Amino acid sequence: MRKNEKRVPGTMLGRLNSLVDTFLILMCICVAAFAGNQVFNTSYIPPIMGGERITLGQVFELQNDVRRRSFDNFSWHDLGSNEALFHNDRIFTDKDSTAQLEFSSGNRIKVSEESLFKITQETDGINLNIEQGIIFATLNNANEAFVVKVGDQIYEITSNDSKIKISNSNGNKELSVLDGKASVRLGDREETIEKGVRVLLTDESYTINQSWPSEFSPLDGDVFYVNDKNLITFNFNEKVEKLFLSNSRSAFENGEAHEVNGLEIALKNLSEGTFYWQVSDVNNVSTEKSFEVVYEVIPEFENLDETQNTILVDNKKLIYTQPFDDIELMINGKMWNDYDYDDGELRLTFEEVGDYEISYRNKAEDHPYALFSRPVLIKVVAKPGEIVLKRPFNGEDYYFYDDGVVKFSWETQDLFSEVSTYLVLNGKRQLVAGNSFSAPVTESGEYLWSLEYVLNNEVIARSKENKYRVTFDDDNSALEKGRKIVVKKPGDVIDLTWQQQGSDKFVVEVSRERNFKTIKESIKTTGSNTKLLIKELGVHYWRVKNEENKFVPPVKIIIVPPPPPKAPRIDKVEKRVQILKKSLPLAIFNLFIDQAFAQDSVELKWEPVSDVKEYRIQILDGEKVIVDEKVKLNRFEWNDYLTGHFQWRVSAIDYWNQESPFSVLEDLIITKKFGGAKGIDLVSPRHGIAINEGDVVEMKFNQVRGDKFFIEISKDKYFTSIKEIALGKKTTYTFRNKLGSSFYWRVKAIEKKDIIYSKKRRVDVTKKEIAQPKKVESVMLPKKSKRRKSWYFGYAPEKTSYEVISGGKKIVVDDMNFISFYGGHKGKLDNYHYLFELKQSSGVVFDDLGFNQTALKGQALKEYQRFHYGLTSLLEYRSELEYNGSEVTSSAQFYFNLGLTGKFQYEKISLSLDYFFLNYAGLSAQVSYEINRNYEVGISLESRSNSKLEADSTNIALRIQYNY
């Protein structure tokens, strides 16, 4: 059975409060004791109590893990490069870690690995309390003592130029002079210690011993900057037997032993790190010494990258390197001496544009194996030209009715990619690109703008400053209205009028935009009206500005076209035509004998429509449109017509390209005339025959279909005055020639309402002379023969070479052309020779492209003994090839040419030379041989070029000619 226990409220809580109070009291006592100790044992007031730190020096160089614990910190912190050193700082270096410190006096120390010491400021100098490890000191200021504290004894070391070593191993502190000499003072005792002397420091006094060997190298604490293929030489002034070398302390116990023969030993390819060494003989063991092997590393540039490697010619470039005392500089593989260098800052100036590859290395004497940095390419470029601003120009005004945009523009330059362009507007910079930039504007006022080119955050070019003014006008009710103006065609003018208001000079501005952002036209005038040339339809705004740059409220006008034109009126057309097959011989005969083979044409006419620029005609075969052409006049000639039943219609197009409805479709009926394509075949007399006055002439033709026939005779080839002889159904007519000159004749046939004419023929008439028959025969026959030989026809297969540059690419044609014919007429008038020749050459290139040439040549030559000279004219219609996209296309062009001609005749051989000046200019040569009166053979060579088209043409042809 449980007993009732009496519980006292608050008993447990009271015990807890008592424990907390006790803990807080103990903490306060500890903190007070620590603070008191620091106050009474330091020579300055700590920062936590309102004092300031005492700076003793700074960190010069660190390697790996180096830490520091300050007086006012309870934990260790990493020590950084260039950090300050303060009174009462404790410094610790870990394994494979070193530090170099420099004091304000100029003295410098190097702390080896696994060392711990404390720095304090004493009355006579810096005090080092070395708890463990090794410190190497370089002393160069005898005015400030280097203090080492051992127990209660203070050793003061001073020197102007010496290197010493202070070590603490297992509580034994030792001072060694490695180079130079130093003074050691303890109380009233002071001695000078030179190189090779060791001083044992105790808390009572110090003992001086001579080092063994007294001279050696490397010196204790030396640093060798080498590469992995190295050679370290040890030298002694006394004979030693063994060298002990180790990567850790206690070289004698842990090191590798090397036999020494004589006073020198060399070790190869030592690894990177700190080495400890000792030497010995039968009676002696030296103190432990150390040196450090550091592999050279490739230095780097600190501020050179893709955007920093471009500089202007003749501009100084600041380049940051690693901070060496001096460097060797190499540019484009050669050592360079023209530079400024100071503690990691390299300044270069390049006088010529180009690419420069630069690298550098440490030039210090203790770095004989220093490596060059990786080459870096520097581009030296020319300075940009003057910056030319375009819009807004200086003094320009802008007039807006609501928020507007100002477009800035300038002339472009070929800038290198690293250059940035900045627009400066009222002092504010804006990065821009290209040759324009648009910025919104919402306030009236004056604005200043300029342009800058920036390279590597430096302004390398700056334009002049332009000023422009912006004006806003909220009262724009006039723009809501507008007046329509009808304009018949582009190029018509309208009148603009305003009130003069005391000024006599105005500028009229016209824009398609309500805010006049873009001015289409600006007209200066001295009156109160001007004329505006209309080029396009739609809404236009215009305003007037006086000399004081005040605007008359703008006005809106709407340019509209007149109503579309009406459809033209047309009629039904019925046409009976004579159709002939097209051929080259017919073309030649029609050229020399007008209308020798005539073909009827189909001409369609309609009533003209006023104020139109052209008409559109369509011919339909059923529902299919077979002709769709535009013509300027109210008629259309259908040259390649067909026979059949068609329909046609016409529309009119005005100057604003408004097209009327088509006219009502009307019939177009085309049928063949009787006789067909062959026509009337004339039998005799043949064309060009010569007869005598009084001869009997029989005119005869083959029978064709017809009701009546007539013979028409005329003295001119155009038949302007004719004599018509009715034949009825007969096909012959005989008469005695009483005409004393040449005449033309033809046959006319009529069937119902159709009329057909034959080709026309010429008959030459010579007056009859009284002479003996033989004499007449001997005189007249040569004349007839000579007249017959004035016409010629020939075949000329040719080798054609043609080259042309089109779209930057060359088109080449090199082929034989076997379809090449020519024909012509030649004669003599007094002392002058003349010639007319037509040549046709046809071919196909690139499988389906026509490549043709038609040439009409005319010559006029004056005779001088066997030599003829004169002028030649040439009309050509030839194919030209060009690139249309990626395809080669062919088009035909007309060319006119003029040249000088020379011809030499020797018996049956003739040589002719032509030189042309225009279009296709160049030389044409021809050699021919007369086989007999009817036949000639020859060779022609032509080489001409067109500089405008960048085209060259060369032809060589064999000519076979028949004279008749």
Image (cartoon, rainbow, N blue to C red):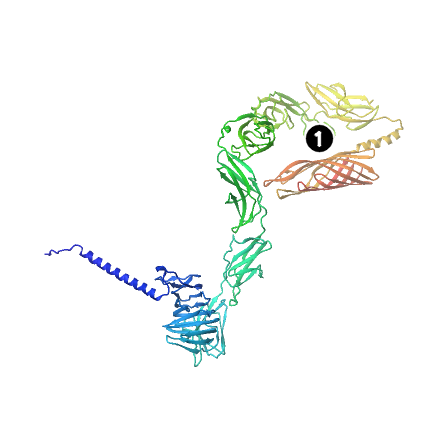
Which of the 4 image quarters holds residue 738? Answer: top right
Query: As shown in the figure, which amino acid type bears the numbered disc 1?
Result: Leu
Q: Nearer the viewer, residue 193 or 581?
A: 193
Q: Position of residue 950 (x, y in %)?
A: 66, 42
Q: Nearer the viewer, residue 609 or 584?
A: 609
Which of the 4 image quarters holds residue 646? Answer: top right
Residue 292 drawn above or below residue 690: below
Check disc 1 and report the residue beneath it: 586
Where disc 1 sits, the SS reads: helix
Q: Position of residue 775 (x, y in %)?
A: 88, 30
Q: Position of residue 620 (x, y in %)?
A: 58, 25
- Judge the density around disc 1: few (<14), some (14-19), many (≥20) Cα neighbours within 10 Å: some
Residue 363 drawn above or below residue 379: below
Which of the 4 image quarters holds residue 754? Answer: top right
Q: Nearer the viewer, residue 961 or 350?
A: 350
Quarter of the image with the N terminus in it: bottom left
Q: Position of residue 841 (x, y in %)?
A: 69, 37
